[in-house]
Amino acid sequence: MAKWFVGARFFGKKKPLQSVIFISDKCNLKCKHCSVYNYENPNVKTFEQIRKELEYCYSLGSRFVDFEGGEPFIWEDNGKRIDDLVDLAKQIGFYSCTITTNAQRPFVNSRADSIWVSLDGVGQWHEQIRGRGTFERLEKNIATCNHKALSANMAINTLNYQGVAPTIEYVKNSPYFKSISLNFHTPFEGTEYLALDMEKRAEIIDLILDYKKKGYPIMNSATGLKKMKRLDFTPECWVTNFIFSDGTKLAQCVGKEQGVCDKCGFCMAAEMNAVFNFRPETIIAGLKLRL
């Protein structure tokens, strides 16, 4: 990792450090803020397709991989399930694997190094976005998953921003969650109404920073959060490469193609900039998350 940083920062070698692979766009929910699900004709990759994609990402220099969907825990190919992909990634040489899930299906004893559970609030805040009964099923499945590195991931929007404080409190008091990551809705086509204006975003970030100062388990670094208030940093989003469910490969987030970088809500963008500029707090936070 030190070699990667020196090459990137001082020699202009822009190799990805992590990869996001969408293994399917098949999902068991229809969330209001989602722009990637596909019910009529979902793409579902085969095990061999994903093997080639992992090998491709590794050849670029990536050493951390996130499996996303759709819903990864419903993916299946001739008896292979998501944990078989985790094993495959480790065999290829990836340092750690993360799975992002809506926690609507049991995921007991998953072999992923970390699991991010999409949590859009407590109770009604979550269900007004994801549907009735989703919060109860989420609570049931995190209670039985038996995973040591379970984190919540909240996407803050116009429907749930008032639930940010209760959600942070909920994660702190939960015996199952290790931490929470907070992001803001990015206004992709068809979901623009869910994006907060910059004034309200800044207000929410100040709230999050206050909780962080008090020692709440917030994954975001203070540096990254402050950068997201202004969005005045140079994006270094090449740190993560993406492969979508249709096989499309992008060297950075799809937000650039859609022209929404000036309204970006993915706090990872600020974290990547902070890592690239060698902010120790952010680097330590990233290491804790990944390793």
Image (tube, rainbow, N blue to C red):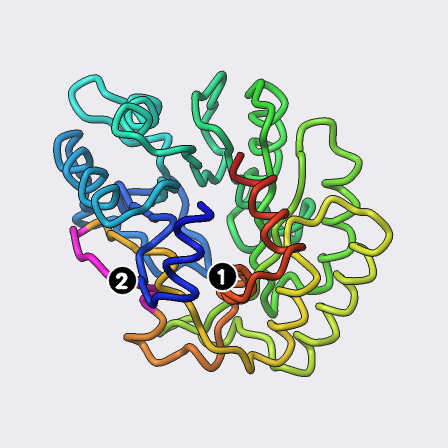
| Disc assigned to residue 251 | 2
Residue lying at 44% horizontally and 45% vertically, measured from the top left: 1
Magenta stretch bounds: 246-254
The amino acid pointed to by label 2 is Ala
Q: Position of residue 32 (x, y in %)?
A: 46, 59
Q: Position of residue 199 (x, y in %)?
A: 68, 83
From the image, give the main secondary structure of the stretch colored magenta: loop
Q: Is residue 59 left or right of residue 195?
A: left
Mark 1: few/some/many CA within 10 Å (<14, 14-19, 20+): many
Q: Is residue 84 left or right of residue 109?
A: left
Name the secondary structure under disc 1. helix
User: How many numbered marks, from 0 up?
Assistant: 2
Examine the image and state in which quarter residue 72 appears: top left
Q: Reading the chain from its start, which is encountered first: label 1 or label 2?
A: 2
38 lies above or below 137: below
Name the secondary structure under disc 2. loop
Q: Is residue 140 magenta?
A: no
Comparing 90 with 9, the one in front is 9
Comparing 43 with 237, the one in front is 237
Examine the image and state in which quarter residue 192 appears: bottom left
251 lies above or below 116: below
Distance of mark 1 from mark 2, alpha carbons? 14 Å
Q: Is residue 38 left or right of residue 247?
A: right
Residue lying at 53% horizontally and 78% vertically, measured from the top left: 233
136 lies above or below 191: above
Q: Which residue is mark 1?
A: 272
